[in-house]
Image (spheres, grey):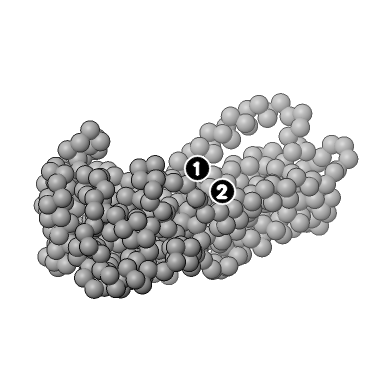
Amino acid sequence: MSTLESSGPIRKAWWPYVVLMLAAIPAVWHVLDFDEDVDPEFPAVTRPVFSRYPPAAYRLAEPGDTLDRIVLYLASLATVVSAVGAIRGRGRGLWLAGVAVSLAALWHGATPWPTVDGWHGWGFRAMADPAAPAGLRVGLALGTLALAGLVAGSFWTNRARLHESIALSRARGDLAVWIVAFVFLTLRLIEVPDVEPFGYWPRVCFIEALLAANSALVVALLPSWKGSRRGLLYGPLAAVGWFVLVAGGVWLTWYHRPLARFKVVEPGRIYLSAMPTRRGLEVAQERRHFKTIINLFPEDTPLRSPILPDELAFARTHGIHYVGSPSDPSELASSRFLDETLRLAQDPSAWPILVHCHGCMDRSPAWMGIYRFLVQGRPLGEAMKEIERHRGYRPKASVVLLYNRVLRERGGERYWHDPAARLLRECGNDLVVSPGGEQVAPGVANPEATARLSNGGEARSRE
């Protein structure tokens, strides 16, 4: 990476390969390990798994989630290390090329794809999107040309020393690490391997590429760093620079997804999210133009959200119909509330609708599953898979019991013939749960459906 002189004999660095292998361990673990914990709220209820891989792997792969956040940290680090190398090298070496490539990686990680519901976003792909504003497309094109020019200029300026740089890199042992980084980066850009959990492995490849690049950069920088008194100054400045880049990347990711855990249920009609902030609603409203907001969380409790007043004020200001969960915990009130939300979900005059709770981890995904099964007529197993992949966790025992009650009352013959519904009845020991959380007797079960219940071990297979 650099032609900086090194003092003493050059030793090959093998630790970057150890770093890459250690980083691969949790990546593999997340797609192999199914949690077997018991829900303490209802310990007697078995919690089934419907997805092929552990739910956490799907959540990690969601755009803007954990894996993309790790990319921000590593790309910012690579940018800072490259900048320090450029300052230390005084124009020698390919450090400026490293700065340009690292900034491109940072921008790519901070503008996760795909965007929600077809919004053009600010990523590099927006340059080819005719729906994106012309000014944005031109700005992205100019930025891309500037970064490409910095890379090309760096190589051109140091063309006479390229052989020396390659020889030095080979002697240090980081040349092979750069090749590994290039291979992983290519896999990320072409979205390979594109297998379940979709988006997971390409993002892991991106992390591995940046780990390899950072390792190679450190190997190249260390010889000139040793014994440097200015290192005491570079360290704090590098830390500040890293923090600023990460903060900028986090903001950019937030702007792409201003509502936490935002999910499209039906494009242009129904969306899910966690409890929205005022700023998040302002940005999202410009793109979605919500007409209805449904809050599934009972706010008349000690767990009331501290930002609820902001949401209510926003709804009033923008003329949005706001539907809150009833303070009455009775089964009748809860059933009426559910029926009202499902009615609104089918009313074109209410679209687009934002459905949310506090964390979009239990109530909102559970509501989505009910909507998928009762309104759209989709198989319950398909809805359960979608819930697991969104919330990143197996269904809570209370969700199993909730479905046993709600779908039993509203699903008709489809409920009794649906394989996933049959499994939930088995897992809940054919019990249901009232809105207040009490286990209650389900009534007389359909004898034909009961006779068709499959063996417990077979039914709990992970498909």
- Residue drawn at 32 percent across, 68 percent down: 450
**Frontmost residue, 25 versus 79:** 25
Q: Pointer 2: residues within 10 angstroms few (<14), some, or many (20+)?
A: many
State the residue at coordinates (56%, 61%). 201
Question: Where in the figure is residue 118, as x and y percent of width and height?
Answer: 34, 66
Q: CA distance from mark 1 to mark 2?
A: 9 Å
Q: Residues within 10 Å of mark 1 (few under 14, many from 20)?
A: many
Pointer 1: what residue? 245
Q: Nearer the viewer, residue 403 or 92?
A: 403
At 48% across and 38% down in the image, what residue appears?
A: 244
Using residue 289 as the reference point, say whether residue 249 is left or right of it.
Answer: right
Q: Earlier in the sequence, mark 1 or mark 2?
A: 2
Question: Does dot 2 land on a helix, a strand or a loop?
Answer: helix
User: How many numbered circles does the render carry?
Assistant: 2
Callout 1: SS: helix
Under mark 1, the amino acid is: Leu
Asked if the residue at tag 2 contacts the one at tag 1, i.e. Cβ–Cβ closer than 8 Å, the answer is yes
Residue type pointed to by label 2: Ala
Residue 116 visible in the snapshot: no
Residue at x 55%, y 54% (from the top left corner) = 33
Image position, residue 23 (x, y; %): 64, 49
User: Could you say where residue 173 lies in the image, as x and y percent from the top left?
Assistant: 80, 50
Badge 2 is on which residue? 75
Question: Is residue 246 left or right of 87 when viewed as pictured?
Answer: left
